[in-house]
Image (cartoon, rainbow, N blue to C red):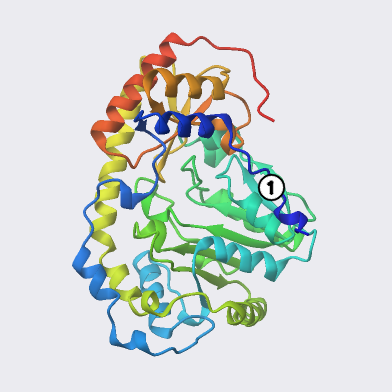
């Protein structure tokens, strides 16, 4: 009766299952996986957000497949703030970046076509690809992409499946925080041109790459057909206000055909609600205060993480961008067993690296968004546990 594309295994993994059992038994945890900004103690400009959603025009429905003009102009102004001129007519609004991926997979791929995606990576694209009847063709980021320092710019850019219809890049990378430098950008564009593949760039964390000099949006790319996605969820810390977008650039003829086709896809759904479109300009205007708080929190927790790991034979991998910290424990480790033991004994929650398809056992992932005192206590317990835990044999995570 049901589609094969939704035949997922709905069983809970051991970590989630036992966490739920312990919570039901009354246990509480130092949660180093919390990544919902609205649950992390930030001060939101409540009245300004309410005013942004109270426009009298919300009582009238004006369907615009690409999104209301005023909202698209507000997004264009956001990119102008990044030094990248953007034409509002080259934007298509969506309800989220996940929906943007769905639109783009449908635009670019026939059933069974392949899309090149990076590993390690946040575990989302597998589901979106399955729902869109697309096959993922993983490409491995160079080891330097999750090693501290500037070596990533000198690393050879990985090869892509030459049959891929599109190449996905996440910048800053989630969870590693790295970004391609100018030379890597050129190699990436050249590969897309060589194989006639479109480029999809997910930039939801772009505003959290302040320390990286190459923080330049791909929205300015003109050489190859390029789609840049982002939205309020990350750049304004407002995941509950569902507004994302796709910016289309590249050679004029292909860009215009892509926009025309995307408009028809968007017209089929018309999923972006009117209040958030009417409030887009105001919501983007109040984001600076929120971003400032989030950046301060990320910097403080990164410093705490570095200090805590120093005596544990581990290190913070990747680059200082995005919302996550990657811990390289410095040896092969049964990540799932360690995470379970840490939860049971120390009441600290972390994610094993294999959730993100890291190339070998020995990585742990933490969110840097949490309260600074809770984070400090949690990573100190984590570091102490690492000191007590020798390297173990590799456990199959399949």
Marks counted in the figure total: 1
Q: Is residue 71 above or below residue 295?
A: below
- Residue 113 falls left or right of residue 239: right
SS state under label 1: loop
Which quadrant of the view contains residue 25?
top left
Q: Quadrant of the C terminus?
A: top right
- Residue 335 image point, x, y percent: 55, 23
- Residue 293 falls left or right of residue 321: left
- Residue 30 image point, x, y percent: 34, 30
Instruction: Write down the residue under mark 1.
Output: 8
Which quadrant of the view contains residue 383?
top left
Q: Is residue 122 visible?
A: yes
Residue in front for this viewpoint, 74 or 190: 74
The residue shown at (47%, 49%) is 172
Q: Quadrant of the N terminus?
A: bottom right
Residue in front for this viewpoint, 227 or 127: 127
Residue in front for this viewpoint, 39 or 203: 39
Q: Is residue 146 above or below residue 340?
A: below
The residue shown at (67%, 80%) is 257
The residue shown at (54%, 83%) is 65
């Amino acid at each position: 009766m049901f589609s094969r594309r939704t035949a997922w295994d709905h069983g809970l993994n051991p970590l989630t299952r036992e966490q739920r059992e312990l919570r039901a038994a009354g246990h509480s945890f130092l949660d180093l996986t919390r990544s919902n900004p609205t649950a992390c103690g930030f001060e939101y400009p409540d009245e300004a957000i309410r005013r942004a959603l109270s426009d009298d025009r919300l009582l009238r429905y004006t369907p615009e497949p690409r999104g209301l003009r005023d909202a698209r102009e507000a997004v264009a102004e956001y990119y102008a703030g990044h030094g990248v001129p953007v034409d509002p007519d080259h934007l298509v609004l969506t309800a989220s970046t996940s929906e943007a991926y769905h639109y783009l997979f449908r635009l670019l791929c026939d059933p069974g076509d392949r899309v090149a995606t990076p590993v390690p990576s946040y575990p989302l694209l597998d589901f979106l690809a399955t729902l869109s009847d697309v096959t993922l063709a993983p490409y491995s980021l160079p080891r330097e992409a999750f090693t501290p320092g500037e070596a990533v710019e000198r690393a050879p850019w990985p090869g892509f499946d030459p049959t891929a219809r599109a190449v996905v890049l996440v910048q800053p990378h989630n969870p590693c925080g790295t970004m391609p430098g100018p030379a890597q950008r050129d190699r990436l564009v050249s590969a897309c041109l060589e194989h006639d593949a479109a480029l999809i760039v997910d930039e939801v964390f772009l505003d959290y790459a302040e320390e990286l000099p190459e923080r330049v949006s791909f929205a300015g790319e003109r050489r190859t057909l390029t789609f840049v996605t982002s939205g309020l969820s990350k750049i304004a810390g407002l995941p509950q206000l569902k507004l994302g977008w796709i910016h289309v650039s590249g050679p004029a003829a292909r860009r215009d055909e892509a926009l025309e086709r995307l408009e028809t896809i968007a017209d089929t759904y018309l999923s972006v609600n009117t209040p958030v479109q009417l409030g887009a300009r105001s919501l983007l205007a109040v984001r600076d205060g929120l971003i400032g708080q989030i950046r301060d929190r990320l910097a403080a927790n990164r410093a705490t993480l570095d200090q805590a790991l120093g005596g544990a034979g581990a290190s913070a991998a990747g680059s200082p961008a995005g919302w996550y910290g990657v811990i390289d424990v410095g040896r092969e480790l049964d990540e799932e067993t360690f995470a379970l033991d840490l939860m049971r004994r120390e009441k600290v929650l972390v994610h094993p690296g294999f959730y993100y398809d890291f190339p070998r056992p020995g990585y742990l992932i933490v969110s840097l968004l949490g309260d600074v005192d809770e984070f400090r206590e949690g990573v100190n317990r984590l570091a102490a546990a690492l000191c007590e835990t020798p390297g173990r044999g590799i456990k199959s995570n399949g």
